[in-house]
Amino acid sequence: MNERILANVGGMPISDRDVDEFLAELGERGRAYNTPEGRKRILEQLIDNKLFLLDARRNLLEAEPEFKAQLAKLRDRLLINYNAERAFSSITVSDAEAEKYYNENADKFVAPETVNASHILVDTEDKAKEIYSDISAGKITFEDAAREYSSCPSKENGGDLGDFGKGQMVPEFDAAVFAMKEGEITAEPVKTQFGYHIIRLNKKSTGEKISFSDVKGRIKEALLAEKQQQAYSSKVAQLKILYPVDILG
């Protein structure tokens, strides 16, 4: 496939492939620029780069000692990174290894317990008890009571708070709701910094096992990082035998 030349700067061409490579170097940020307008801005940046390069060559900046010193440092860093990449490039983690880890660490792959609850929030304990009494007597539904009396924005949904896990609510509310049974309504109002709550537990989901397919990628990444760290430590230990290190400070 032929490259499409987008610009020439002092005889130096800039192609669409140059723009693609620049975007790739930006990583995740590059996605935002992969639009007609974004690519135009990248092209402008590449043109600027070529201009500075041509100017540097015209002024023989490559021969300056300070540039040579910077180039030497950069070359060393590139060589270090290249050597490390070569050393660890063959390290892989198979699906079988990941599944073995998954089976041997089943307790780590359990979804946290969650609940679905509704509440009615009022300012006083007496008011909360009165509302609870009316709900228990069938004079009003929980949802209608929430819409009429609750000061929480959830009143618009009949007091429904949706699903949440431990620690997402204030401690007093959290302790009460996770100790309840499905369908239960708190007979005694639960006091928090916001006021008095009448809570109904709609549903409780106990921790379910997360499937291997859902966590395979995450496990493989973790195992790969662990293998690479072990290989790194081993490589450093070998190199210290070849090249003795004397710490003088």
Image: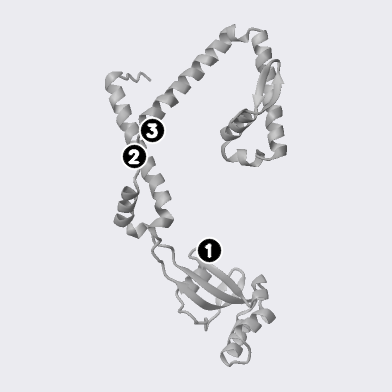
Q: Quadrant of residue 154?
A: bottom right
Q: Which numbered tag is attached to residue 89?
A: 3
Looking at this view, name the residue that lies furthest to the left: 241
Q: Callout 2, which amino acid?
A: Lys
Q: Which numbered tag is attached to residue 168?
A: 1
Q: Secondary structure at mark 3?
A: loop
Q: Secondary structure at mark 1?
A: loop
Q: Callout 1, which amino acid?
A: Gln
The N terminus lies in quadrant: top right
Answer few, some or many: residues within 10 Å of disc 2's Cα (few below 14, many 20 plus, some between 14 and 19).
some
Q: Callout 3, which amino acid?
A: Ser
Q: Position of residue 80 (x, y in %)?
A: 43, 23
Alpha-carbon span between mark 3 and mark 2: 11 Å
Q: Secondary structure at mark 2?
A: helix
Q: Earlier in the sequence, mark 3 or mark 2?
A: 3
Q: Position of residue 40 (x, y in %)?
A: 71, 33
For the residue pair 139 and 9, the one nearer the viewer reads as 9
Task: Tell me if residue 130 comes above or below residue 79 in the rendering.
Answer: below
For the residue pair 183 and 91, the one nearer the viewer reads as 91
